[in-house]
Amino acid sequence: MPLTLRIITPERIVLEEQVDQVTATAIDGELSILPGHEPLVTALTMDVLRYVAGKEDEFVAVMGGILEVKNGEVTVLSDAAEIDREIDHLRANEAKERALAEKTQKTDKLDVYVTEMAIGRAMARLKAVEFREQRKRRR
């Protein structure tokens, strides 16, 4: 009995698919969800969510949010999320470099925080692309 995974942002439903396993990074560590998992609600960090559908590992860059497990459904609500194949590696790398350069020029705590969030988003996107490339090499 597979799980139903839904990843939802304010703009769109990023993913709705039957999966065998979901692995995500919560604020207190990594967790994996398999069919029959107990109900759960947890906050997510900015990182890569991995899911297994059939024999394939798939990756989604998730910019934090909330993960809920209930009745065989895993729902992720996030401000932003991108499936690995949607991510432009060059643009993500440029965003990271731009944010790193900006961080050195900021002194206000709020500006530094906003810049660190931009770095975190870029790093999550780049990590998803890296996992996608590793998957391609294994084939």
Image (cartoon, rainbow, N blue to C red):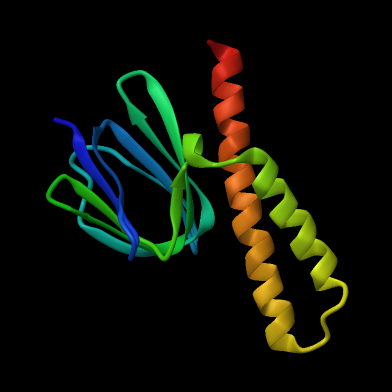
Q: Which quadrant of the structure image shows residue 112? A: bottom right
Q: At which x and y percent is residue 88?
A: 59, 41
Given the current orientation, which residue lies at the most extreme bottom position?
Answer: 108
Q: Is residue 24 above or below residue 3?
A: below
Q: At which x and y percent is residue 94?
A: 74, 51
Question: Which sits in the foreground, 132 or 12?
Answer: 12
- Residue shown at 35%/40% (left/top)? 22
Count of marks placed on residues: 0
Question: Which sits in the foreground, 123 or 10?
Answer: 10
Q: Is residue 52 above or below residue 76?
A: above
Q: Which quadrant of the structure image shows residue 18? A: top left
Q: At which x and y percent is residue 49?
A: 45, 45
| In this rendering, position of residue 92 left or right of residue 15 | right
| In this rendering, position of residue 115 left or right of residue 31 | right
- Residue shown at 23%/46% (left/top)? 37
Q: Is residue 128 above or below residue 116?
A: above
| In this rendering, position of residue 133 left or right of residue 67 | right
Given the current orientation, which residue lies at the most extreme right position?
Answer: 104
- Residue shown at 82%/81% (left/top)? 106
Q: Which quadrant of the structure image shows residue 108? A: bottom right
- Residue shown at 34%/60% (left/top)? 9
User: Where does the N terminus fall, quadrant-wise?
Assistant: top left
Q: At which x and y percent is residue 76?
A: 32, 56
